[in-house]
Amino acid sequence: GAVVSQHPSRVICKSGTSVKIECRSLDFQATTMFWYRQFPKKSLMLMATSNEGSKATYEQGVEKDKFLINHASLTLSTLTVTSAHPEDSSFYICSARQGEITEAFFGQGTRLTVV
Amino acid sequence: GQNIDQPTEMTATEGAIVQINCTYRTSGFNGLFWYQQHAGEAPTFLSYNVLDGLEEKGRFSSFLSRSKGYSYLLLKELQMKDSASYLCAVVDSNYQLIWGAGTKLIIKP
């Protein structure tokens, strides 16, 4: 299957700082990328959907000024958690799809801990 | 609203067979995915069904009935490494993936 690389896999940051997470599709062009958040023992929660070259569509309740998403190319999307707080600590996962009815390929996930 | 139901947790014995059910009610239907997720890892793709019937892939099979809004994932010859969460996801009319909460499968020796 296709490969999606997410970096970093783990990050610890101080409260008030910003953290950038990268998501790259290595061997295909991702028309759409998705960012999810997952709490322990819970299912994936979609945060936002981004299409290359356009603004991301955020799900209800997700602060777009806090979770900045940039999808500058067909192979790269970034999620920046701005002014992070301990409650932002979570597992963040990106996924990419090549078309509308294709499986989503997931990155390895990023474990964010804000101290 | 849109809804996908799966059992929260199931237990099975190594070498046995287990069936994980998924029922859905969504605005439109453009296919159903099953994913496996080990703790602390990202989900990995298992199967995709868009037409009614059974799709077999090695030890794993997935079934779909669109008229009943129902799917199941069948795992045969269970191995300890199959202990994981199994996520059902439906593509709705807007081509969004709607996720179920996942079924935690525990395999006992």
Image (cartoon, coloured by chain):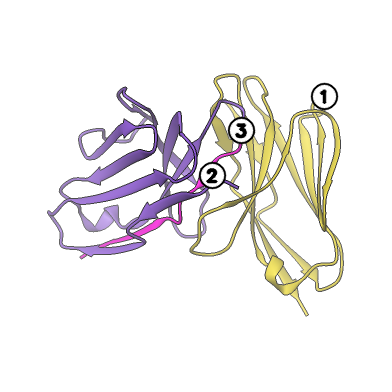
Chain colours: A purple, B yellow
Residue A110 horizontal/vertical position (percent): 37, 57
Tag of residue B67: 1
List the residue tagged with mark 3. Answer: A102
Verify CB contact (< 8 Å) between mark 2 and mark 1.
no
Residue A6 horizontal/vertical position (percent): 39, 52
Q: Please tell me whether mark 3 sits on a helix, a strand or a loop.
A: loop
Which of these two is toward me, B5 or A46? A46
Q: Which residues are magenta?
A: A103-115
Does the stretch in magenta take in A2?
no
- Subunit of label 3: A
Which of these two is toward me, A31 or B37? A31
Labels 3 and 1 share a subunit: no
Estimate the spatial distance between the alpha carbons at disc 2 and disc 1, rounded to whole Å. 28 Å
Estimate the spatial distance between the alpha carbons at disc 2 and disc 3, rounded to whole Å. 9 Å
Does the stretch in magenta take in A108?
yes
| Residue type pointed to by label 2 | Phe
Verify CB contact (< 8 Å) between mark 2 and mark 3.
no
* Residue plotted at (24% across, 49% down): A20
List the residue tagged with mark 2. Answer: A105
Depth check, mark 2 against mark 1: the one in front is 2
Which residue is situated farthest in the bottom direction here?
B109
